[in-house]
Structures are given as structure tokens and as C-alpha cells.
């Protein structure tokens, strides 16, 4: 099945609205799912839809939250997401936090009591396209062993960064603190494929390549060993301790059969680079990029997504048979 982005979003909105999500909020969730498919991020596209629906159906996530925004300090906003999805909270604060960053040079947003079940790059790319440096991170339920521990204690705790460029798409990366993202584990489980060696361990700490064991009781390993452990810890501090969100080990989703999300927090930092370096920022970025290519780099972060995006916009988005049935019937 080939489908256009607009049609895909319309179908997703219909499904989400049918589960009690107000249409304006359903549009935000639908966009992040559709963008994942459009840009080839299959782990966070339609593969996540059932997780949204199940997490709402079991009562773990509010289908129609009423997030509340608070102006905490000149350069700081906080949003209580009211146990809803983080995209709704971010949309509420988007204009205000960008305005603060432009006025002050930098500003941060703390989101608590939220569920982030999407890729992070859709959160930061729009800010970079508007000329702001953006850094965001989300903590999640405990899924990885850190600092040679014996059991999982921190989440996969992803981080995304976006750097604006003048007249060119921003440089954007989005990565987990674990060696493999939870989304990729879900993809392997759905396809019945084993994980590559060295990604995870079972309940007893023994290496495993079975994605179902990892999802049930095993643990992922941090990227780069102790370095990934340090990144996951930093995310836990900024996205949970600082925002007032739950730590990963405080997760209670196990009490709600079918819940696939984490009630946690999100941290966002925006910087207006022109406030420090003026008009020289963009030429300096291009000189850096030129040096990277001269040193042998073959591509920049997000280049692959942008290429797939162009193909999808030209030819449509390819949807597999299983997801086609879900989109058409909503079940």
C-alpha cells in the first residue's frame, strides 16, 4: 500500500479520536507517527500505534489531558502534562519557550507527568529550522544496566540535538543511551528476528539475542559501556529530577496490563546562537561541515532521513499489509 502523508495522518487521527483523544491532540500524535513512516524511522512509526492505543485503553494514559503551563523563571517554563502524551505538552509551550530563547538568548522547558512514545527528532527539528539550537531528552522506565550493575536501573533515555544551518536543512541526531533503542527491540520482536550479539542480557545477566526475553525481563546494555551509563544518568537528572517527573525505577505501568509507555519527564533547552556570535555562526557551521567532509565523513546526521523524506513526498509512503488493515479498520 502506498499512501500520502496527509492521508496517513487523517487515518491516524480517526483511529486516535475513536479512542477518545480530542482531534487537536490526535493530530499531534498522528503527525509524529506519520513522520516516522515518512522518514524511514520505522521503529517509531506505525510500529508504535498499538502502544499508544493500548496505553490509553488500559487507563495508564489520559486520552484527553488538560496540561498546565507555569512560568517558573525568566528563562524557564514548566508544563504538567496531566498524565498525557508529551507532544501535547510541548505544543502548548512551543511558542512561549521559543520566544523566551530569542529574548534571553537561551531558555529551557521542563515537562513532567508525561508519556513520550515517539522519536525525539520531531521535537527539535522545527526549532532548528527556525534558527534555534535545540537539545532535548526523555527518561523512561528502567531498561538498562549501568556501571556494571546487576539489574536494570535506568531507561534507554534518548537524547536529540538539532543545529540550524542557513539555507540548508538542520543537522539533527536522535539516539538512545542504550546500545540499541527500545523501538528497535520491538521491531525485531515483531519480525521474529534475533538481536545482534552484545545488545542485551537476560534476567540472570547472561547474554541473549532473544528480543522477547529482553522485553519481558531482560536488560539492554548502555552504548559505550560506562560512557552510555553516564549519558543515561544525566538524562535521568535533567528529565526527571529537574522537571519533577518520575525516575525510571518509580514506574508503575506494570499495574496496568497493556501499558507500553512511561510516565516520566522531558527536558528541552533552546539557544539563539546569533545572540553570542551574530552573523558569524552560520559561516562557522559551514566551515565545520566542510572540514568533516574533507576528513572523509560520508554523510551528516539526518541526511538519511531527509533522503527518505524526499522519496516519500515524491512516491508516497509504503505501508505493510498488517498496518494497512489497522489503518483501514482501526482495530
Image (cartoon, helix red, strand yellow):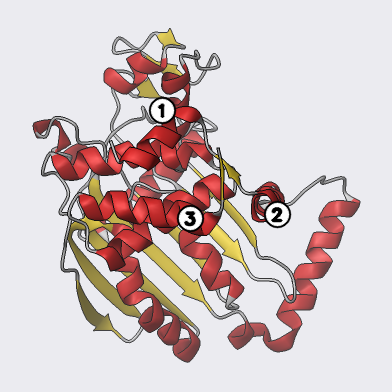
Residue 314: which disc? 2
Give the residue displayed 24% in from the left and 82% down from the top: 71
Q: Nearer the viewer, residue 82 or 319?
A: 319
- Earlier in the chain: of badge 2 and badge 3, it is 3
Residue positioned most to the bottom: 103
Q: Is residue 260 left or right of residue 164?
A: left
User: In the figure, is residue 174 to the left or right of 139?
Assistant: right
Q: Which residue is mark 3?
A: 7
Residue 177 seen in this snapshot? no
Residue ranking furthest to the front? 328
Q: Is residue 39 above or below residue 77?
A: above
Mark 1 = which residue? 186
Q: Position of residue 119 (x, y in %)?
A: 45, 49
Q: Residue at x 9, y 33 (%)?
A: 255
Q: What's the distance in space between the residues labelled 1 and 2, CA to CA?
A: 29 Å
Tell me residue 293's x, y (percent).
86, 53
The crowd level at tag 1 (other Cα within 10 Å; few <14, some 14-19, many 20+) is some
For residue 261, which quarter of the picture?
top left
Question: Quadrant of residue 205 in the image?
Answer: top left
Q: Nearer the viewer, residue 277 or 245?
A: 245
Q: CA distance from mark 2 to mark 3?
A: 14 Å
Amino acid at each position: 500500500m502506498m499512501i500520502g502523508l496527509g492521508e496517513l495522518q487523517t487515518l491516524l487521527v480517526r483511529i486516535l479520536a475513536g479512542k477518545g483523544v480530542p482531534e487537536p491532540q490526535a493530530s499531534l500524535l498522528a503527525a509524529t507517527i506519520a513522520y516516522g513512516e515518512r522518514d524511514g524511522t520505522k521503529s517509531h512509526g506505525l510500529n508504535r500505534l498499538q502502544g499508544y492505543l493500548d496505553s490509553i485503553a488500559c487507563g495508564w494514559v489520559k486520552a484527553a489531558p488538560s496540561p498546565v503551563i507555569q512560568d517558573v523563571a525568566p528563562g524557564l517554563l514548566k508544563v504538567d502534562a496531566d498524565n498525557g502524551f508529551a507532544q501535547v505538552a510541548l505544543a502548548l509551550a512551543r511558542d512561549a519557550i521559543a520566544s523566551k530563547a530569542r529574548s534571553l538568548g537561551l531558555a529551557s522547558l521542563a515537562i513532567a507527568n508525561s508519556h513520550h512514545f515517539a522519536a525525539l527528532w520531531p521535537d527539535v527539528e522545527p526549532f532548528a529550522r527556525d534558527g534555534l539550537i535545540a537539545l532535548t531528552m526523555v527518561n523512561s522506565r528502567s531498561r538498562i544496566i549501568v556501571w556494571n550493575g546487576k539489574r536494570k536501573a535506568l531507561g534507554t533515555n534518548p537524547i536529540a540535538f538539532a543545529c540550524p544551518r542557513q539555507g540548508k536543512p538542520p543537522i539533527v541526531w536522535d539516539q538512545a543511551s542504550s546500545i540499541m533503542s527500545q523501538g528497535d527491540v520491538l521491531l525485531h520482536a515483531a519480525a521474529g528476528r534475533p538481536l545482534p550479539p552484545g545488545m542485551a542480557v537476560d534476567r540472570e545477566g547472561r547474554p541473549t539475542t532473544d528480543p522477547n526475553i529482553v522485553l519481558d525481563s531482560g536488560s539492554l546494555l548502555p552504548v559505550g559501556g560506562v560512557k552510555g551509563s553516564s549519558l543515561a544518568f544525566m538524562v535521568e537528572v535533567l528529565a526527571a529530577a529537574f522537571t519533577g517527573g518520575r525516575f525510571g525505577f518509580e514506574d508503575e505501568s506494570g499495574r496496568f496490563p497493556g501499558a507500553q509507555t512511561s510516565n516520566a519527564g522531558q527536558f528541552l533547552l533552546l539557544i539563539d546562537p546569533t545572540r553570542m556570535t551574530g552573523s558569524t555562526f552560520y559561516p562557522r557551521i559551514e566551515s565545520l561541515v566542510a572540514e568533516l567532509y574533507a576528513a572523509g565523513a560520508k554523510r551528516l546526521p539526518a541526511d538519511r532521513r531527509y533522503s527518505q523524506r524526499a522519496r516519500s513526498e515524491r512516491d508516497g509512503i509504503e505501508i505493510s499489509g498488517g498496518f494497512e488493515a489497522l489503518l483501514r479498520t482501526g482495530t
